[in-house]
Image (cartoon, rainbow, N blue to C red):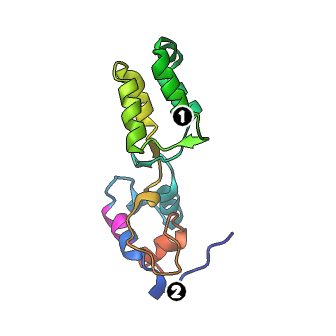
Amino acid sequence: MVQQDVAPEEAWYLPALAVELLTDPKGVGYAAMDKFQAAAALNTVGLTDEVEPSHATTSVQILTAIGVAVLAAMKDKDRQTLDSLILAAPTVDLWDADLWALITEILVDEPEALARVEALRTTSTSRAMVLDYGPAPEGFPERRRIQYCDVARARDES
């Protein structure tokens, strides 16, 4: 699907994008890039240290992060509690306060396993995904991907 050009008066996100391109807070090197390269860089996952909360973690991811040795050494009661929490749905939200409290309680003596599970709470993302453009006008989707024409407009290129 090709993105339609947006009329300048409707380009509500351009001021924030212009600031990003001018200040380059993550040191990506936008100034040395043409509009195509800058748009690609803004949309590249993992190019910067950007992360965002992950609200859908699978039980396999959690069990893998905990590790076989830790699971084998776990008390039956703790293992049953863990199984009932994470196997009840296809995915769980590790940002749920009650669930996170139980997991940290179960893994209190396993700091490395807890750290691996905690790492699942966030996921790498692109700079475009975390830029704060402010609220979208009614009828416009939230900006999540930058196009080369957006970069050109933000730089005021003809």
Residue 85 seen in this snapshot: yes
Picture residue at 49% right of the left edge, 28% below the top: 82
| Location of mark 1 (residue) | 86
Picture residue at 42% right of the left edge, 35% below the top: 119
Left or right relative to 142: residue 27: left
Q: Amino acid at mark 2?
A: Ala
Q: Is residue 46 magenta?
A: no
Helix, strand or loop at mark 2: loop
Helix, strand or loop at mark 1: helix
Q: Nearer the viewer, residue 73 or 75?
A: 75
Q: Amino acid at mark 1?
A: Ile
Assign the magenta stretch its main secondary structure: helix
Q: Give the number of the disc on residue 7.
A: 2
Q: Which residues are magenta?
A: 18-23
Determine the CA span between mark 1 and mark 2: 47 Å
Q: Residues within 10 Å of mark 2 (few under 14, many from 20)?
A: few
**Residue furthest out toward the front:** 77
Measuring from the top left, give residue 42's x and y in whole percent.
Answer: 47, 58
Name above or below for residue 78 compared with residue 45. above
Name above or below for residue 95 compared with residue 43. above
Measuring from the top left, give residue 117's x and y in whole percent.
Answer: 44, 31
